[in-house]
Image (cartoon, rainbow, N blue to C red):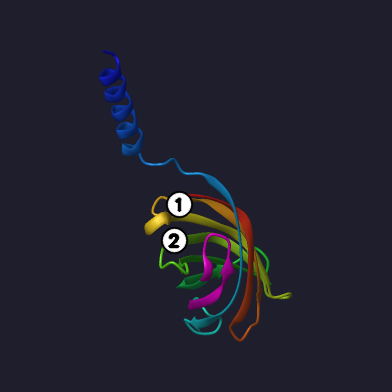
Amino acid sequence: MTHPRNMYVLTLTLFLLGSFPAAAVERPFSLHGEGNVTFTGGNPPTGGDITVTGTGTHLGNWAGAGMISFSPGLEPHLILASSQQTFMAASGDELYVEFVDAELDTSTGIATGVFLFVGGTGRFKAASGSADFVVIQDPSGPFELTTTGVIDF
């Protein structure tokens, strides 16, 4: 009578496999967006509020908001930027993003840096990873954003 015992082992195995959370998987990540910075803090600005929308892998159509702060770079035409943002995916899940010391060249309007994915909600709750970004910034506020990297969730 090994049949009932085999069924018990199979049932227990299936139960235990379903009890463990799935491991995060590294996936390619890219997005494109357009947005605006509303500068704050005088002239030159010391920060701003960011709004942005676009499309991206794992996000679909997304919208983002956050804050950015600026500090002087090593060269007169360079500005360092740090930010915390929330990207909301088409599904409603949120992805939390931050970057530190991205570099904006005021002579070209081009900023480069690295997004760090630091969690979120829903499927992005334990998100991690990074993506290089390029921003083409208009001095009046509008910008275009492109990223490429990897995300684990």
Residue sticking out furthest to the right: 108
Q: Which residue is mark 1?
A: 127
Q: Which residue is mark 2?
A: 96
Q: Is residue 107 visible?
A: yes
Looking at this rendering, what residue extends furthest in the bottom direction?
140
Mark 2–mark 1 contact, CB under 8 Å? yes
- Residue 145, relative to residue 117: is it above or below? below
Image position, residue 101 (x, y; %): 56, 60
Three-letter amino acid code of the residue under disc 1 = Ala
Could you tell me which secondary element the residue under label 1 belongs to?
Answer: loop
* Relative vertical location of residue 51 with respect to residue 2 in this rendering, above or below: below
- Which residue is at the front of the view, 11 or 51? 11
Residue bounds of the magenta highlight? 48-61
Q: Is residue 140 above or below residue 34?
A: below
* Residue drawn 38% across the image and 58% down it: 122
Q: Residue at x 47, y 82 (%)?
A: 40
Q: Quadrant of the N terminus?
A: top left
Please identify the dominant SS of the magenta region. Answer: strand
- The answer to which of 1 and 81 lies nearer the viewer is 1
Question: How far separated are the C-alphas under marks 2 and 1?
Answer: 8 Å
Mark positioned earlier in the residue sequence (2 or 1): 2
Q: Position of residue 11 (x, y in %)?
A: 30, 29
Confirm whether the magenta stretch covers residue 101. no
Amino acid type, callout 2: Tyr
Percent across and percent down for residue 77 are 69, 72
In the image, is residue 49 part of the stretch drawn in magenta? yes
